[in-house]
Amino acid sequence: MSGPRMAPLAALALALCLSACSGRAPEPARFVPPPPSVTDLEGPLRARYNLLPTLALGEAVAREYRVTRDAGSALLVVALRRPTADGDETAAEGEVTAEVVDLAGRRQIVALRRVATGSYVDHVGTVRIGPHETVRVEVAVVADGRRQEFDFQRSF
């Protein structure tokens, strides 16, 4: 093969060689936790939430939430807050329940417990997860005499 068709193949071969011959070993992928998410509920009430693998937690955080770091589990955190007029937040009281549903429709009820973190209270529980799994988290909040629901999805 020669002529104009050879030039793109030669460029591709050169690019592959340069990337393969750079002398650096490939690095394994690292988990980058998603930023905590937030949803505004009626009240005014705000729910801050996250679901992340327990192995992504630092030792101090795992101790504070009293969870065991494990490759097959994720920590669900739901924090209820009240927005203030100055843009800040204060602690909010309420009951939180949650269920996790995987893509096959299997459900896990999450046993949430209250954990004090400074002047706030977080609702935390662990969820069993598998590698490359996607789950939907269905959360119900009872506060100020009303029940409100929201859901979100995470992939591992």
Image (cartoon, helix red, strand yellow):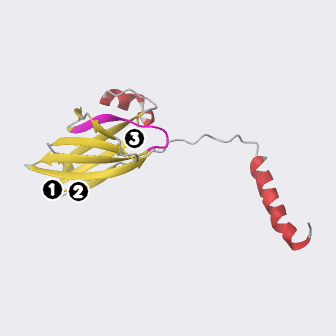
Q: Earlier in the sequence, mark 3 or mark 1?
A: 1
Badge 2: residue crowd in 10 Å (few <14, some 14–19, many ≥20): some
The image shows a total of numbered marks equal to: 3
- Answer with mark 2 or mark 3, whichever residue precedes in sequence: 2
Instruction: Specify the principal SS of the magenta part.
Output: strand
Identify the residue shown where x is 87% and y is 73%.
4
The answer to whether the residue labelled 3 contacts the one labelled 1, judged by CB atoms less than 8 Å apart, is no
Mark 3: secondary structure: strand
Residue under the image location 45 percent in, 43 percent down:
133
Tell me residue 69's x, y (percent).
41, 28
Of badges 3 and 1, the one in the foreground is 3
The label number, if any, that marks residue 149 in the structure image = none
Residue identified by numbered label 2: 40
In the rendered image, residue 122, in percent from the top left (x then y), is placed at 24, 38
Choose top left, top right, bottom left or bottom right for residue 84.
bottom left
Name which residue lies at 76% across and 42% down: 23
Inspect the image, locate mark 3, and give the three-letter code of the amino acid beneath it. Answer: Leu
- Residue picked out by circle 1: 44
Residue 52 tag number: 3
**Residue occupying image coordinates x 32% and y 43%:** 100
- Graded by Cα atoms within 10 Å as few (under 14), some (14 to 19) or many (20 or more), the crowding at tag 3 reads many
Q: CA distance from mark 1 to mark 2?
A: 7 Å
Which residues fall within the magenta stretch?
A: 121-133
